[in-house]
Amino acid sequence: MKPNSTLTSTDGRTMVPGQSTDGEGYVYQLGAYLRISDDDKDPETGELSRAGVTRQLRDCHPVAADLGGAIVKVYDDNDTTASNPHVKRKDFEQLIKDLENGVIDGFVFYHADRVARQAYDAARICQIYERNIKLVGRAASGGTDLSTTEGRAMFVMQAVMGGVEAASTRRRKTTANRHKAQDGKDHVGRLPWGWDREGKLVQPYADLRAKGIEMVADGATITDVIRFWTENGITGAAATGKPVLYKTAMLRITHPRNAGFRAYAPTDERRGKATPWGPDILLYDDKGSPVVGEWEPLVTPGVYWRAIHRLEKIREEAKASGANGGTRPGHRTHMLSGLLRCGKCGTRMVASARTIKRKDGTSFKSPFYRCPTTNNGCGKITRSAAVLEEHVEDLALEALKRIAGRTSAKGDKEMRAVAAAEARLREIGEEIKEVMERRKPDAPKRISASVAMDMISELEDERGKLQYDVRALSTKAADIRGRTPDLIREWEDFTTDRKRLELTKLVKAIIVEQAPRGRHFDPDSVDVAWQDV
């Protein structure tokens, strides 16, 4: 290789042990470890520049020659951090294995903090060298010689100090990001789905995401949204074409930025935890109001909180029924499941299906509802699902028409309650600030830190309840106002889950009596217990 030629991390030369360039003596078979944390990317191709590791390798070759060896293998962890214990460096781990197994006689490196920035990683290297005193290892910069006790001590100190420097940098960056969040400024790492780097909406993704939020607010499930996105060409990975993951869809639906609100959750707090629940990462100002961001919102706060409240209700119902409290709802394949009661024994009726054979030899499934013989059921009443569902739908649509014209006043009442709750939230923010002022030594009516914390704890409990009430009342107002002719016109396009949701707002239970003999269907055998709407 020419002395002035450009070196890359693929220029390692393989030599047989015992062989030398001049035919005399043993040539150490050495590795070269290269690493920088953040490499520059080409904005168009996305390719890494590799300039940093190339320079490191160029500096490592003279060190290897001074040791009486040659670089036969390059360990390259370009664009990889060494200070994060959660990040596994593939080539560093391979270097450890090769040193332990005698594949190489040692390694050279640019500086100790290129190899390790954690005491644990530095100790792993030192332990190998302490067990095998024949290994050689030296840095191009920093004066570290791993074959000596003093050199290993220097290696550990330089690595630890490098880690301290990295931790300080992370701390400054975290503080800066938190301050940006409190000011409503966007911190964009990976582009959020539906926005560009300037915070402008990108179509058609923004509309599809907004439609998904609206669907959940109106009663659709997360699975319904995933199906809708898939039908419109939105998949999780373009290569596989598989649907968006459930947890990804959940975060897209519940993220506060949808309503223009700022969220903040440091990486260290998110690591190792489940997908964050949107309201848990919403950032509030000192008055208890959500911090508004500097980007275009997808939906109004009202629509966002309706969607959140729907999912919260699902979670609460799951916990009440003994489930694990997740937010993935069960899927209803029958509109009246859970609403029907046997007219003889009062037991909840269940959905079943019987196989019916046609004259041409083919068969089909015919769904029906029945009183079960388990759970104290009598098992004596059955009804065709299609006929019963059609009749109940007709009754529900008639009920919607009757109440459509007399609900706006109720909606106004709920919104006034929302406004009162929001005003109290602002008051709580001011009261917390006052309590903190009274804790100071020069305050006129000074209180102890213990008393201050007790008072703040009570105010925070009240604030948490009010924030939940705002969501619940906003959802209730939207439900009341949503029972309009528009809902009636859209009924046929609703999914089974959505129809059942609307029925639960209208109906407490549907009691099914045994039908008289000789008649296909008797409307009088169906008694509906209506909700107070």
Image (cartoon, helix red, strand yellow):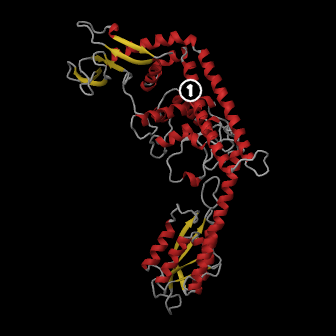
Q: Is residue 197 left or right of residue 34?
A: right
Quadrant where the N terminus is found in the figure: bottom right
Above or below, 315 against 390 in this view is below
Camera-nearest residue between 505 and 419 = 419
The residue to which callout 1 is attached is 475
- The residue shown at (59%, 27%) is 474
Camera-nearest residue between 427 and 151 = 427
Q: Is residue 492 left or right of residue 366?
A: right
Residue 223 appears in the rendering: yes
Camera-nearest residue between 214 and 183 = 183
Q: Position of residue 172 (x, y in %)?
A: 69, 58
- Give the number of callouts: 1
Q: Position of residue 420 (x, y in %)?
A: 66, 27
Above or below, 252 against 494 in this view is below
Q: Position of residue 382 (x, y in %)?
A: 27, 18
Camera-nearest residue between 6 and 380 = 380
Give the residue type that dot 1 points to. Answer: Thr
Q: Position of residue 493 (x, y in %)?
A: 47, 21
- The residue shown at (64%, 82%) is 143
Residue 228 appears in the rendering: no
